[in-house]
Image (spheres, rainbow, N blue to C red):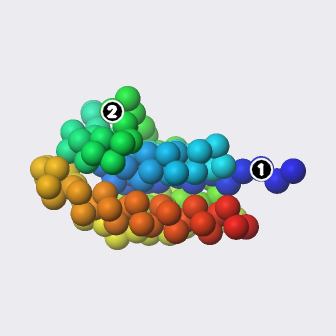
């Protein structure tokens, strides 16, 4: 039996984009895909506007906390999706890397975070369709 795919979302602070992406993936894919997120320089807490924007679509990420990116986490992932962390992410053969260019929600209100959230949802939905079809 093949092991289920593992997706790692990485951004600098692991407080906004990567947490929203992980929230959508866990919500939409259930147990079909392992979901992880991390940051190259994690913030102390999750962005409250990201928490509020996700709550508006019925996904609670308030219990999550920013985590430090480790080489082991990258190496054991099927797909690593970076969101503005550039070269801070270590490279390993056999791991698929993608960079999603998304505006950073840091310091923005929920009105500005909503369109970022919606872009992330569209990309996560497409990612699930691709990974589950493999």
SS for dot 1: loop
Report x, y in % for residue 62: 33, 32
| Residue found at the very far right of the displayed protein | 1
User: Which label lies toward us, 2 or 1?
Assistant: 2
Report x, y in % for residue 31: 64, 43
Instruction: For the residues labelled 2 and 1, say whether their Cβ atoms are less than 8 Å apart.
Output: no
| Residue found at the very far top of the displayed protein | 63
Residue, disc 2: 62
Report x, y in % for residue 115: 24, 63
Q: Is residue 91 left or right of residue 12?
A: right
Residue, disc 1: 3
Relative to the observer, which residue lies in front, 103 or 90?
Answer: 103
Q: Earlier in the sequence, mark 2 or mark 1?
A: 1
Report x, y in % for residue 5: 67, 54
Local packing at callout 2 (Cα closer than 10 Å; few below 14, some 14-19, many 20+) is some
Residue at x 31% of width, y 57% of height: 117
Relative to the observer, which residue lies in front, 125 or 98?
Answer: 125
Q: Is residue 49 left or right of residue 72?
A: left
Give the quarter of the figure containing the C terminus.
bottom right
Residue at x 72% of width, y 51% of height: 4
SS for dot 2: loop
């Amino acid at each position: 039996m093949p092991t289920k795919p593992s997706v790692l979302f990485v951004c600098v602070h692991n407080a906004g984009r990567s947490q929203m992406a992980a929230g959508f993936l866990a919500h939409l894919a259930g147990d079909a895909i392992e979901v992880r997120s991390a940051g190259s320089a994690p913030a102390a807490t999750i962005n409250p506007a990201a928490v509020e924007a996700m709550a508006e679509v019925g996904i609670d990420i308030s219990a999550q906390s920013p985590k430090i990116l480790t080489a082991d986490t990258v190496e054991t992932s099927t797909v690593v999706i970076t969101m503005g962390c550039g070269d801070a992410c270590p490279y390993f053969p056999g791991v698929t890397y993608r960079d999603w260019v998304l505006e950073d929600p840091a310091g923005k209100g929920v009105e500005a975070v909503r369109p970022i959230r919606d872009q992330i949802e569209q990309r996560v939905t497409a990612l699930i369709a691709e990974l589950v079809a493999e």
